[in-house]
Amino acid sequence: MTGDTSERSEPRVSPSIRFIERYLKKREPAEIMSLLLVQIDSFNRVATTFGTQASRDACEDYAETLRMLLPQGSHVIRLSERRFALLMTPDSEAVVTDLAEIIAEAHQPRIEVQDSSFSVDVKLGAAMCPLHADDALTLFRRAELALQTARDNDESFAVYQPNATMHQATKWKLESDLKGAIANGEIEVHYQPKVELATDSVCGVEALVRWRTKDGRAISPDNFISIAERTGDIIDLTWSVFDSVLESVQSWGTLKPSFGLAINVSPQVANHSEFCVRLQALNEKLLKFDIKLAVELTEDSLLKSDSRSMANLHKIRELGVDLSIDDFGKGYSSLTYLKQVPATEIKIDKRFIETIGVDETDQQIVKAIFDLAHALDMRVVAEGVDSEENQDMVTALGCDIAQGFLIARPMHGDDFVEWFNNYGSNPLEIEELNDRGSEQIYGF
């Protein structure tokens, strides 16, 4: 009974951790022990598509495959329907990475349905004893951190790095702070002007989300947008942007006929059940100020569109809202999707524009894109126009609209009307406003 009381007073440890602990104790002092966590991607989608039994059978078969790949004396632990822990004593870290690569690239789990066979991707995370930890629980947690790193970076596998714990803690704090910033209305929207090249007149703005923490740190959208998408906070963040945009427009009043305003939208938001309702409400309010609303979606996200997503894109157009393909040319993809996407505008990725003045190949590529867009009755925006040379070149090649630091940096909504009213009339005043906007977004 005294033994039972003693055990009850200890923290509860899972059988898997106990097994790993026993395995560690058998390790020779100079011996390396590796824990490799393997996770099957999209398991729920696999089960929904092919049925629960088919997915379970595939996992059972995969467990046998893993056993055959491991050296003698290794163990495979089934942690859940889609997760496995592999225990082995490799000669070096290189053996672990080589095995991880073999598992991820050459031995993915397969779903067999009738006469068809489908492979499913896996992600792996590795930690080693005594290099990364000398007890089972810490070793397991660090292998999980490595697995999370692989998932965050969209890599097949990752090995635990000593700074990963601090990095993960920082990321968790950022997630918590972002949720609070959205709830408390601390997220700002800045506006970067666009100019119609044929008339050299301001024709619209792009709304860009900005976050400055309470302690004054500027967090790059490249960092917090991905966090918001992963946690689901991107939904509330987008609604917050909608509210801020409307508030700004109400303070601006009517600027000019059919003035354009573009908002970047994540595919996760575009497919949300409330999106079209909220978009319609925003559009109706903006139309009172003669504002032409556009939704920007990245080319990469559009390439992944399924039938449901494509239907939502058509709903956007049915509302009278324009659809812009952002970062066009950033990836390496077929252009056939342009036949399906009801876009009204293409935004050339700024990496083409940055070198267009000196790179003849980029000039030819951009010219071909301009011609293609115009043939499909789409206007073209050149992003990243930061020099007069670049602006002259995109104008000569037939671009419709330019956006970049040469014209203006993103600025707070309160400064935009003053900038708009002075554009083209007082270069020194425009330069001063540009500098002011630059200070507001320093580090973004």
Image (cartoon, rainbow, N blue to C red):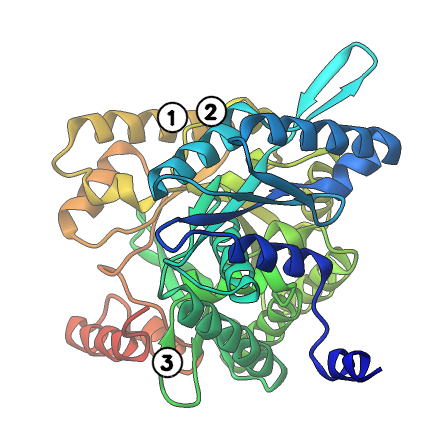
Local secondary structure at mark 3 = helix
Q: Residues within 10 Å of mark 3 (few under 14, many from 20)?
A: some
Residue 394 appears in which quarter of the rendering? top left
Residue 346 versus residue 333 in the image, above or below: below
Which amino acid type corresponds to the residue marked 3 in the rendered image? Asp
Quadrant location of the C terminus in the rendered image:
bottom left
Q: How far across and down, in percent of the image, does residue 411 sit?
A: 36, 74
Q: Name the residue tied to disc 2.
A: 375
Residue at the spot 64% in from the left edge and 26% down from the top edge: 65
Residue 10 in view of the camera: yes
Residue nearer the viewer, 349 or 142: 142
Which residue is rendered at x = 59% and y = 83% of the image? 180
Q: Quadrant of residue 436?
A: bottom left
Residue 415, disc: 3
Residue named by callout 1: 371
- Determine whether 132 is above or below 397 in the image: below
Q: Which amino acid does label 2 sit on?
A: Ala
